[in-house]
Image (spheres, rainbow, N blue to C red):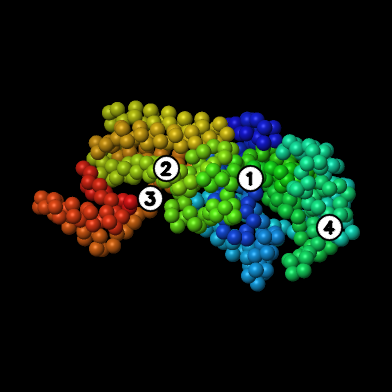
Amino acid sequence: MKVYNTLSRKKEEFIPLEEGKVKMYVCGPTVYNLIHIGNARPMIVFDTVRRYMEYKGYEVNFVSNFTDVDDKIIKKAVEEGVSAQEVSQRYIAECKKDMAGMNVKPATTHPLATEEIDGMLEMISMLIEKGYAYPAADGTVYFRTRKFEEYGKLSHKNLDDLQAGHRDIKVTGEEKEDSLDFVLWKPKKEGEPYWESPWCQGRPGWHIECSVMSRKYLGEEIDIHAGGEDLIFPHHENEIAQSEACNGKLFAKYWLHNGFLNIDNKKMSKSLGNFFTVREISEKYDLQVLRFFMLSAHYRSPLNFSADLMEAAKSGLDRICNGAENLKHLSKNAQAAQMQGTEQGLWEESGAFVQKFEAAMDDDFNTADGISAIFELVKYINTNVDGNSSKELLDRLYQRLSELCNILGIIVERKEEILDEEVEKLIEERQAARKEKNFARADEIRGMLLEQGIILEDTREGVKWKRA
């Protein structure tokens, strides 16, 4: 299995630190509002990476945090006249609902920054002792960026260039030794949540939070650290500096970053009016469609979100689900139980699509090519099975298709929908009308049901229906 490592800027063979186990940390959202579709991309992408690792037999310790103390959370709390904790707890709960809707598996651990303050105080103290950090007169603690000689190795940024031309991305402060030094701990402002520390009453800087949570739940060295490419600098660069300066070890072996999400070829922003939450998308589409859309491109590529592309994703997902549904329908009515005649050969031939899928996923988790392999499997199934196929072959093919989709977090089994009595009676009436050769009435009922969004399909095995 090869993965693209942002650290080396090339694909590398994946070799875990410990055989059979993977330690993986993914930066989670800051919980001050409903998550947007930009947040959804890394959630879906790295959940899929985790699922494939587990499919390959690895035991994955997957940690993804919630940043529950932050300027945006405090601002929202002030606006609403409630505590910052109330805001963060509310939106953690809402985030988990959206994650469930997207079929994102809960992390092994979902740590909260506010519950790990002791670990942050400990790490900051160690950095001060080792000379990598220093407290200013106002109680702010800064990290000595230049003291960490490998600073810039992830983002491939040069410190002197940063100082000369990137002043807009630096934290400013009069008491800093160097303008590039970044904050580990900062004094509280009036009305803000705070914690006691040896330096001042205050709260942690953002970067220290992930270093501490990763260290506590995964150890000083981890296999994979992941997130959106917007986190490469300064967040992940600063995490490396803090963690490696403190622990004296390589922090993460592989760094994975997903590409940006654009809306109709423009950057998503509230000012442009093209900002969508996952909850808003769920009002128009099943969130399985959003997941399928996110996986239709390679995770490192920029991805453009549009109504047309979502409709295309819906059609693609329907093709797969219809193929699975057809297998279940045929299985229910199959005459022969065991595989017979040429069926063993058909079953063995279908394994080629599994190999194609695995080859795609082994090549830096190429879900786009993985989906193509699934489409080919569906086409193969539709071409080679019918009402004469054995139940064993149909069930095995369904299991094979379902397993590949499950790696992508795609659920092929549609929820059973219960029609109300009036609609059920109409379907029965139509069946009776057809028996009596009253085709005008049968067509009239079909039209009435279509107006209610119910599509009927007459097959040799009986009437099938689905919602439009």
Which quadrant holds the N terminus? Answer: top right
Dots 1 and 3: beta carbons under 8 Å?
no
- Count the labels in the image: 4
Mark 1: amino acid: Gly
In the image, what residue occupies the spot 72% across and 57% down?
116
- What residue is shown with label 1? 227
- What residue is shown with label 2? 312
In the image, what residue occupies the spot 65% across and 72% down?
81
The tag earlier along the polypeptide, 1 or 3, is 1
**In front of the other: label 4 or label 3?**
4
Local packing at callout 3 (Cα closer than 10 Å; few below 14, some 14-19, many 20+) is: few
Helix, strand or loop at disc 3?
Answer: loop
Helix, strand or loop at disc 2?
Answer: helix
Mark 3: amino acid: Arg
- Residue 416 percent coordinates (x, y): 35, 54
Query: In the image shown, does 303 or 415 lie closer to the viewer?
Result: 303
Residue 140 seen anywhere in this rendered image of the structure: yes
How far is disc 1 from disc 3 in space, using C-alphas? 31 Å
- What residue is shown with label 4? 140
